Image (cartoon, rainbow, N blue to C red):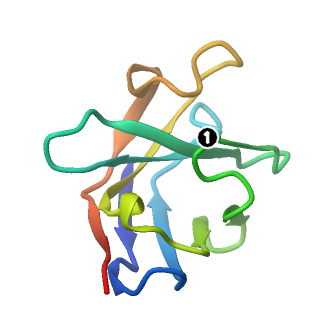
Amino acid sequence: VQLQASGGGLVQPGGSLRLSCAASGFTLDYPVIGWFRQAPGKEREWVSCINRSDGSTVYANSVKGRFIISRDTAKNAVYLQMNSLKPEDTAAYYCVAGAPDYSNYDSFQAYDYWGQGTQVTVSS
């Protein structure tokens, strides 16, 4: 199982970026793809996740209404469209895969695989 995140960069406040997570080697044992982020000196924060089978999504309150997670089952990819970006969104973003349930989908320990991070910097 491999996850490859991409799409990070430098953007001004209010701008948009779309992150991609390419997945390979997957089985139905890992139906959920999620995004976490971590800024220097801060704890890792869960951002969002999507069930690859039924498309159900969940968002952290800090990004709800601004970020949209989606999937392309044909390409085995998951995307995170980030709009109205704020300086506090600056972090390394990681995609993860696993089989969490409704009690632990926001816990990093609930996921079995993760890819390398892609840096998002929101600054003027």
Report x, y in % for residue 49.
62, 44
> Circle 1 is placed at which residue position?
60
Instruction: Identify which residue is drawn at 41% across, 60% down.
Output: 89
Image-quadrant location for residue 84: bottom right
Q: Residue at x 65, y 12 (%)?
A: 103
Which image quarter is the C terminus in? bottom left
Name the side, left or right, on which 33 lies relative to 115. Answer: right
Judge left or right: residue 21 versus residue 52.
Answer: left
Q: Residue furthest left?
A: 41
Residue sitting nearer the eye, 53 or 36: 36
Q: On screen, 9 above or below 81?
A: below
Q: How many labels were placed on the picture?
A: 1
Compared with residue 110, is residue 115 higher up or lower down, i.e. above or below?
Answer: below
Question: 28 or 36, which is in the foreground?
Answer: 36
* Residue 55, x across and y down, in percent: 81, 51
Residue at screen point 71% across, 49% down: 52
Residue 43 percent across, percent down from the top left: 27, 33
Disc 1 on helix, strand or loop? loop
Placement of 35 over or under 19, stated as above or below = above
Residue 114 screen position, x and y as percent: 34, 44
Q: What's the amino acid at mark 1?
A: Ala
